[in-house]
Each structure stands twice: as structure tokens, then as C-alpha cells.
Image: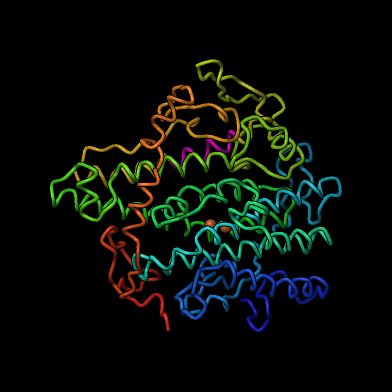
Amino acid sequence: MINYTEKIPNNVDLGRDRVLQRALEHWQPAFLGWWYDMGPNESRNYDVYLRTAVSVEPDGWAQFDYVKMPEYRWGIFLQPRDEQRQVNFGTNKGQAAWQDVPGEYRSTLRRIIVTQGDTEPASVEQQKMLGLSCPSLYDLRNIFQVNVEEGRHLWAMVYLLHRYFGRDGREEAEALLARRSGDTDNPRILGAFNEPTPDWLAFYMFTFFTDRDGKFQLCALAESGFDPLSRTCRFMLTEEAHHMFVGETGVSRIIQRTCEVMKENKVEDPSAVRALGVIDLQTIQRYLNFHYSVTLDLYGSDVSSNAANYFTSGLKGRFEETKINDDHTLSEAEYPVSEVIGEKIVTKKVPALTALNERLRDDYIREIESGVSRWQRVIDRAGIPFRLTLPHKGFHRAIGNFAGHFISLDGQVLTEEAWKNHEFEWLPSPKDHAFVQSLMSGRVADPGKFANWIAPPVRGINNQPLNFEYVRFN
Ligand SMILES: [Fe+2]
Ligand SMILES: [Fe+2]
């Protein structure tokens, strides 16, 4: 168990490294300053029924209780060390896993950690205002849970920066608190983390699509030859599962409610559906198209020498690297990538080493496909003839081989003009956003009550009933 009398709960024996402890104790008030400034709006005095990580034991790692969020114990937890662990891929394959940063990879590794760390506070910033329009106390508690855990993920990355990267690391840790999502002068590093999350449908889509990118990035980093990074990411993945659950069930409950209302009132036309105060399936599809396409960009260029370099050096592996049955050096292998030539999308084979971003994106897409088919089952069970579809991989892309091209939902190469003619059939329009936000103008805060546009969940959190007081406003 973690000693909660320490300022920073941890299982990394922080108390024995005074320099590190002081650096983190110095960073902690700056972090709290950021939380007060950019964390959930007006939430300072709420008592929230939150889980807190208290150990890394699989059967007892979390404890649930009411917590004021600024008093949340953002701890530092690494999965226990495996003394036998090796670098499992790349040219250093077979070496003992590194317990310190190899000098030649120092700046690359720092860049990888900073890029991951930057996404964590970014999503908190993006979701800052949503508590004011929550559909229930259950959902309010869930967004706060996601927010405090993204805060803990920031702590996890800052620990690595402070512990292993000296002064450079401390400067990067400060910069992580200085960038702001969507800021024109000092934005967050990755595009999707500068997009607004203006409403709860966007929040659930974000946690389904973009937190799942987080999962795949963490899985790739969990394979790292740099053991402290691997162990940190393994523990973060435990928490990430709940974020994706919030997203998947959130969208599913919205779909369910829409379908119920459509059946009860025998309506199908989107404007008739909207008039009944629920979100039409066409709008849900457009949100899906948006969040899917901006998240695909997070994987980076289809062909990337950086990705090859990360792999060859043993810093970032493939999804489930050690379960893959090949040489783990990719010296001969090839992998298919797409590109636009004239008016056609063609697939060609390139060295697999250079296509690792594309491969991780494809692994991600497979998981997304099964999630979307679970949403589809909700519609099918209601007997409504509507199909949710995933856009073509090239649709609405700003990074990689499709950037600068105008690809339709079904993968046709269009002119800019032709594409623009369909833009708001395919992506949410300002009117769609205004409609969705009109449903979410205030907070539903009576225990057990849910907004009209979303179905209640199947069960509560930690076996509590649905009418449990998940948040007390005081
Ligand atoms: Fe995270
Ligand atoms: Fe997350």
C-alpha cells in the first residue's frame, strides 16, 4: 500500500531521492495552479465520488470515496519491475532492458515522453466547461474521473522527465503546464488536442476515439526498451480502460435513447427526431466522421523515418510486439500503404520499418470497427433501418499521404469544390453544433435523473445505485 502521509503518493521510493522529491514538490504547486486555471470549471468545492489509485495490485489498486478534486492524490505508480526483461525489438534486441536512458537516445526519448505527456493536460483543458451541462450526476462524476486521471497521467510523464532527464526534463515539465489547448501562440503539440470539445456528444466521441489512440500509443510505449517508460505506461493503461468505457457507453446510451424516441413516436425524419429533444442518428454519424478522422491523424505520416528510428532503437514497439511472430527487426518485411495518384487511391508495399505509424493506425481501426458494430446492434435491436459507417481512411485527413486531397466518405478522390459541396453532409455543421448544444444548456443534477437525450446506464459506479449522489455540490 502507498503511504498517504507523503505529499506525493508513489511506489517509486521517492523518499530516498531528495533531489527528485524536491523537484516534484516544486512542480506540484505549479500543477495545482494549472488545475485551478484549466481544470473543470467551478468544481473546486464539489465532493466527487472518485476512484484513486492506491497500489498496483490488480485486485485492489483503486479505492472509491468522496474527494474534492484539488485534493486528489495524483500519485506516481509503475508496474513492478521484471528483472528478466529485455529489449524485445530493433537492433538492440536481446540486451537487458534499460534502467537508465541510453545517452544516444536521450533527446529522442525525451521528445516521445513530452509528446505523450502533452496530450494529458490538453484533454482536461478541452473538457473544462462540460460539467456545467452534464446530463446526470453519474456522467458528471465520470468526466471528473477522466479529468483527474489525465492529471495523474501528466504526473506519470513528469516523473520520468524529472527523474531521468535533469534540467532539460524540468524545463519540459514546466512547458507542459504552459501550453494550452487551442491557443494560437502556444498550442498543444498534436492537432486533435487543439480541437474544442464543445458538448457531451463530442466528449463521448473523444473518449471513444481519441482516448483509444491514447491506449494504442501507450501499448506501443509499454513495449519500450526503456524500462521505466514501459512500466509507467502499463499502469496508465489500467486507468485508460475506464475512459474508453465512458465514451463507448456514452455514445451507446445516446443512440439507445434516440432509437426509443423514434420508435415510440414513429418518426424517422431527422428534423422530426430533433423536435422530440433527442439527437438524430445522422448527426451522430457526422460527429463520428469528425472524431474518427482527426484521431487517425494522431498516428502520423504513413511512411515515417522517425517511426522507423524509434523502432530500430528499441524505444517504441508495435502493438503487442512480443506476441507477434516475426524477427522483431523488420529487416525484410513489407507493409501496404495507400497514396493518391491522380484521381485514384493506390496501395503499394513499402518497407515495414517505415510504415509503423500506418500499422498502428490499422490496429486501432480494427478495434474501432468492433466498437462501432456494438453501437450498430443498439440500432438493429430497435428495428431501425440505419447503418453507422466508418469513413474511408483518407477522408478529412490533414497528415500523411491523404493530406491535401479531398476524399469522400466512401473513398472517391474529389475536387475541392465537389468535396466542399458535401462538407456538412459529412461533418457536423455549425447548425448541428448549435442544435446539440441547445439540448445541453443546463445541468441535470438530481440524483437518479437523466437528460432526455440520453438513456440511463445499465449500472452505477462501484456497485452504487443509479440514484446515488455521485457529486455533492456543497
Ligand atoms: Fe491519459
Ligand atoms: Fe484517457
The part of the image, by quadrant, that contains residue 314 is top right
Where's residue 301, x and y in %? 63, 34
> What x and y, as percent, mark residue 402?
55, 28
Tell me if 291 is positioned left or right of 330 in this view: left
Dominant SS of magenta comes to: helix
Q: Quadrant of the N terminus?
A: bottom right
User: Which is nearer the eye, 147 or 235?
Assistant: 147
In this picture, residue 407 sits left or right of residue 355: left
- Residue lying at 52% horizontally and 65% vertically, measured from the top left: 147
Q: Is residue 31 above or below residue 218?
A: below
Residue beneath the point at 69% across and 57% down: 82
What x and y, as percent, mark residue 18? 82, 75
459 vs 419: above or below? below
Which residue is at a point 34% across and 53% down the rendered structure image? 436
Choose between 459 and 84: the one closer to the eye.
459
Residue 105 spot, x, y in % from top left: 81, 46
Quick check: 79 above or below 52? above
- The magenta-colored residue range is 358-368
Colour setup of the view? rainbow
Q: Residue furthest top?
A: 342
Task: Tell me which image quadrant ligand 1 sits in.
Answer: bottom right
70 relative to 205 in the view: left or right: right
Q: Residue extending furthest right?
A: 103
